[in-house]
Image (cartoon, helix red, strand yellow):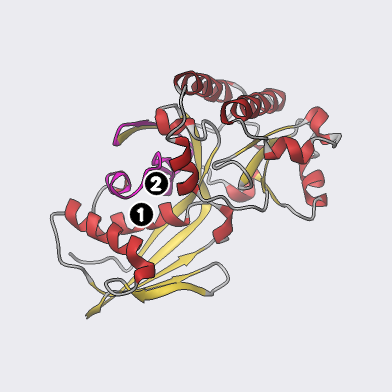
């Protein structure tokens, strides 16, 4: 196995069917412009892993075979080797570099799965289903060149590229709500949820409506409808509705949570083009226009 010198995987955002994607709902997702790099330095020494954040700080390092803090990475590599029909742990030095904040939930783990799969030479989704209980949409986004429709089917998935040409992207904004959620914990909790068939059907339909819509007012209304449904389904208070409850912004703009509920990113659509001004006034938020974050094919 000849390791590559440099590999790259993109981050992700799940726009619809959060949680229900675990049970087979069609979900709409997009890759981010920023991602994670992996650099391989070949030598005969035991495999050493060093992870660097977007500020240039090392946040994880050690020998993969020896350091307990790298147990998950070791498992990912071993499972990738098994998929490739190999068994011997590679030697050398690995350095990963994130381009986005670790707390943002854009896929620091899913990009690693994609990078290891690329390095070893196996299918990233095959590796994902060996090491994670998640739906896999995030790993699919890691190598996507634009928006995708994603549906999990057991330990495989159906993926369809979709066009963003008619989306009202000038009216779309993304904001980090400031409280990173543990996706694996949230996934494990949701997998025990009952009465999911109705939720799968309903969020699939809302996903279809987003694809059919082109006007900002339509997107705004669908985002609110999705958030209202998930608030009832999860029996949890929407962090987006709590954020905008006493603001005039709520009267004309719509928003919804993305990914794990409680404080990850949120998507807003404002037909009046005023969302960014409102979001920037909130000292507790980090907000961006759509075009600064999402990869466009």
Q: How far from the left and from the top, in percent, is residue 198?
A: 49, 18
Q: CA distance from mark 2 to mark 1?
A: 7 Å
* Residue 150 in sight: no
Say which quarter of the image contains residue 7: bottom left
* Disc sitting over residue 25 in the figure: none
Q: Is residue 190 above or below residue 226?
A: below
Which of the image's four quarters has the N terminus? bottom left
Q: Report the residue at 46% width, 67% height from top.
A: 97
Q: Position of residue 65 (x, y in %)?
A: 27, 72
Secondary element under disc 1, as helix, strand or loop, is helix
Residue 259 in the image, given as x and y percentages of width and height: 54, 41
* Label 2 CA crowd tier, 10 Å (few <14, some 14–19, many 20+): many
Which residue corresponds to the image point at 43% horizontal and 42% vertical from the top-left? 188
Q: Earlier in the sequence, mark 2 or mark 1?
A: 1
Q: Is residue 126 left or right of residue 146?
A: left
Q: Are marks 2 and 1 in contact (CB under 8 Å)?
A: yes
For this rendering, which residue is in front, 290 or 104?
A: 104
Which residues lie in the magenta part?
126-155
Residue 80 percent location from the top left of the image? 24, 55
Query: Does the stretch in magenta take in 274?
Result: no
Which residue is under mark 2? 139
Residue 142 counted in the magenta span: yes
Q: Residue at (56%, 22%) from the top-left corner?
A: 206
What is the number of the mark on residue 113? 1
Figure check: 173 above or below 164: below
């Amino acid at each position: 196995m000849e390791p590559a010198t440099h590999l790259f995987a993109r981050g992700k955002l799940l726009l619809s069917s959060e949680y229900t994607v675990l049970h087979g709902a069609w979900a709409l997702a997009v890759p981010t412009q920023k991602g994670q790099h992996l650099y391989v330095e070949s030598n005969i020494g035991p495999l050493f892993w060093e992870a660097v954040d977007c500020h240039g700080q090392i946040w994880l390092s050690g020998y993969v075979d020896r350091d307990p803090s790298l147990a998950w990475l070791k498992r990912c590599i071993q499972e990738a080797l098994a998929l490739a029909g190999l068994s011997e742990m590679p030697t050398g030095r690995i350095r990963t570099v994130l381009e986005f904040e670790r707390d943002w939930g854009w896929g620091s783990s899913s990009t690693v799965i994609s990078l290891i799969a690329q390095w070893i030479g196996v299918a990233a989704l095959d590796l994902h289903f060996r090491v994670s209980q998640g739906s896999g949409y995030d790993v699919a986004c890691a190598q996507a060149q634009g928006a995708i429709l994603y549906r999990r089917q057991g330990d495989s998935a159906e993926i369809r590229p979709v066009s963003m040409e008619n989306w009202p992207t000038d009216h779309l904004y993304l904001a980090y709500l400031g409280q990173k959620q543990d996706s694996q914990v949230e996934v494990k909790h949701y997998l025990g949820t009952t009465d999911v068939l109705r939720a799968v059907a309903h969020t699939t339909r809302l996903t279809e409506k987003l694809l059919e819509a082109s006007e900002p007012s339509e997107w705004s209304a669908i985002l609110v409808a999705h958030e209202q449904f998930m608030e009832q389904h999860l029996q949890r208070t929407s962090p987006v509705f709590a954020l905008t409850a006493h603001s005039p912004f709520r009267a004309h703009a719509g928003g919804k949570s993305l990914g794990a509920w409680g404080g990850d990113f949120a998507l807003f659509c404002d037909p009046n083009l005023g969302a960014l001004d409102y979001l920037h006034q909130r000292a507790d938020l980090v907000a961006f226009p759509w075009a600064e974050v999402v990869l466009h094919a």
